Amino acid sequence: MDAAVDIRPTYPALGFAAEAAPVRAMAGGQGPFALTWDQALRIPVPAGDVVVVVWMAWVIRRFMGTGHALVHLEPGQVVGLGWRAPQTIFGTGKLALADLGLPLAMAPLTSASLPPDPGPRLVTPPHHVRSLADVPTLTSPAAGAWHPDPTGRYAYRWWDGFRWNDAVSDGQQTLSDPVPGL
């Protein structure tokens, strides 16, 4: 994969307890991927026209708030998308271009079902992209180890095999620093 899509799902402050519902995405015909609420995660995709679909599951509504985007990426480019859950179980999610900053991890694959209908297309080219070189490569560092801090605030941050943690180090002492966006 030579391009990427970064996705950050959020829910409304007065929503219906969306944080308890799993949120999923499909990109470039791959997936579904498990997303984490209020955290930007990266999905590697092939360059070219890429369809991105985001949805959540809530009780009997397995494909709630489904929306999709068509993005065009050249090799070495990444685009950021923000998805906002609907306020009610019958509402539509909002998908929009977003400057997400540094993603905290790669989105893991899941065995969830794919939606039969991608929903309304909410983003289409032309759109802003940035170079993958602007974002450190997140290729799933070895589990349970210190790695260079992707936020750049400390020399090292602890990677537990799934996500970056609050444990940071300057090389001599260990401190706690919340991961931005969590």
Image: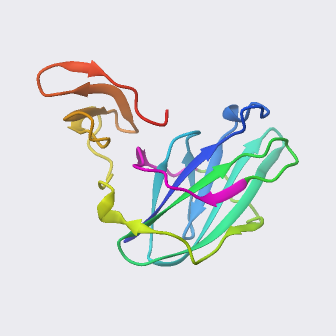
Q: Residue at x 67, y 33 (%)?
A: 19
Taking the view exactly as shown, the residue that stands out farthest to the left is 172
Q: Based on the picture, tell me whether residue 136 belongs to the magenta stretch.
A: no
Left or right: residue 133 versus residue 61 is left
Part of the protein shown in magenta: 94-110
In front here: 42 or 133? 133
Q: Is residue 107 visible?
A: no
Q: Nearer the viewer, residue 11 or 106?
A: 11
Is residue 41 something that shows in the picture? yes
**Quadrant occupied by the N terminus:** bottom left
Above or below, 43 against 177 in this view is below
Q: Look at 44% across and 74% down and name the residue there.
A: 46
**Residue 154 drawn at (x, y percent):** 23, 33
Q: Residue at x 34, y 33 (%)?
A: 160
Q: Is residue 98 magenta?
A: yes
Image spot of residue 39 (x, y percent): 51, 41
Where residue 174 appears, as percent x and y from the top left, is: 21, 20
